[in-house]
Image (cartoon, helix red, strand yellow):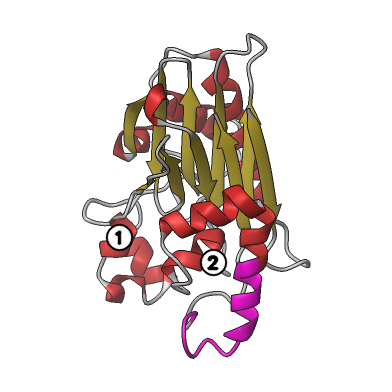
Amino acid sequence: MRTELVSEPGEPTRPNEDFASLALPASGQGGALVLLDGVTPPRDGTGCRHSVPWFTARLGGALTELTVSLPDAPLAAVLSEAIRRTADAHAHICDLSHPRTPQATVVLARWTPQQVAYLVLSDSVLLVEAPDGKVTALLDDRLAHVPRGSLVSDRVADATVRNKEGGFFTAAADPSVAARAVTGTLPRSRVRALAALTDGATRWVDKFGAGDWADCFSVVREEGPQALVDRVRHLERTDATRRTYLRRSKTHDDATVVLAEL
């Protein structure tokens, strides 16, 4: 088995809000990966005294433990329990009802000799490579389908589409959101490798159009995760005026890539 992980902050002066881990149980049978992309908070606060990196570290740590220690639990149940644990850790001192309480996108994958289970919540991506080289992107694309006017400001998005029916969902303080995730299982024989990417890395495909998902996977597999992040950074620098691709997006975003060749 080959595994690689790269995580790079968008700006060196700001903490990285992503979280990633790989777990390989001592039995030598199977493994798991966890990827979170923390949602950058608005300027006027979140109702919580903790930072987004604190939240992603707590939630990511719980998910890493539970994906291994509860091998028979569905991944949605694992996410639900991890959210509950994280919320319990600060509900007594923070307002977790605030619409921008710390939150994150989620990708989980867990494999055994028989199958690969997956979960995707919000706009991070899990790429699956089959033995014949075909690459499939497992996506939760609800954010891409919300009306653009609903995202014109944090206030409008929070009131109309964030963690609401007809909008999109992230892992925050409500364990029931786990039921909204895209989940499924694949026969282990149909999976040769996995790559999980936060949206700071998927920009190479979905913002800059430098290639499709198969091309993206090829870069990660053949040149390594750092090569994909380096390519994204180059494209960001060339579009620093935001006139062509970035427009209202951040010039640089936290970028994380996890590769697992099974």
> Where is 132 relative to 203, above or below?
above
Residue 199 point in image, percent of width and height: 50, 59
Residue 51 in view in this figure: no
Q: Residue at x 63, y 27 (%)?
A: 1
From the viewer's perspective, tell me whether residue 131 is left or right of residue 46: left
User: Which residue lies under the disc numbered 1?
Assistant: 161
Residue farthest to the top, as pictured: 27
- Whether 165 is drawn above or below 33: the answer is below
Residue 42 numbered tag:
2
Which one is in front, 78 or 196? 196
Number of residues whose C-alpha sits closer than 10 Å to that of mark 2, classed few (under 14), some (14–19) or many (20 or more):
few
Q: Which residues are magenta?
A: 231-246
What residue do we see at 59% from left, 52% from top? 220
**Residue at horizontal 67 percent and vertical 66 percent from the top:** 230
Q: Identify the residue at horizontal 28%, vertical 76% (top origin).
A: 149
The amino acid type of the residue labelled 1 equals Val
Q: Nearer the viewer, residue 96 or 174?
A: 174
Q: Tell me residue 128's x, y (percent).
A: 43, 41
In the rendered structure, the answer to whether residue 162 lies left or right of residue 3 reads: left
Q: Residues within 10 Å of mark 1 (few under 14, many from 20)?
A: some
Q: Is residue 90 left or right of residue 72?
A: right
Q: Residue furthest left?
A: 166
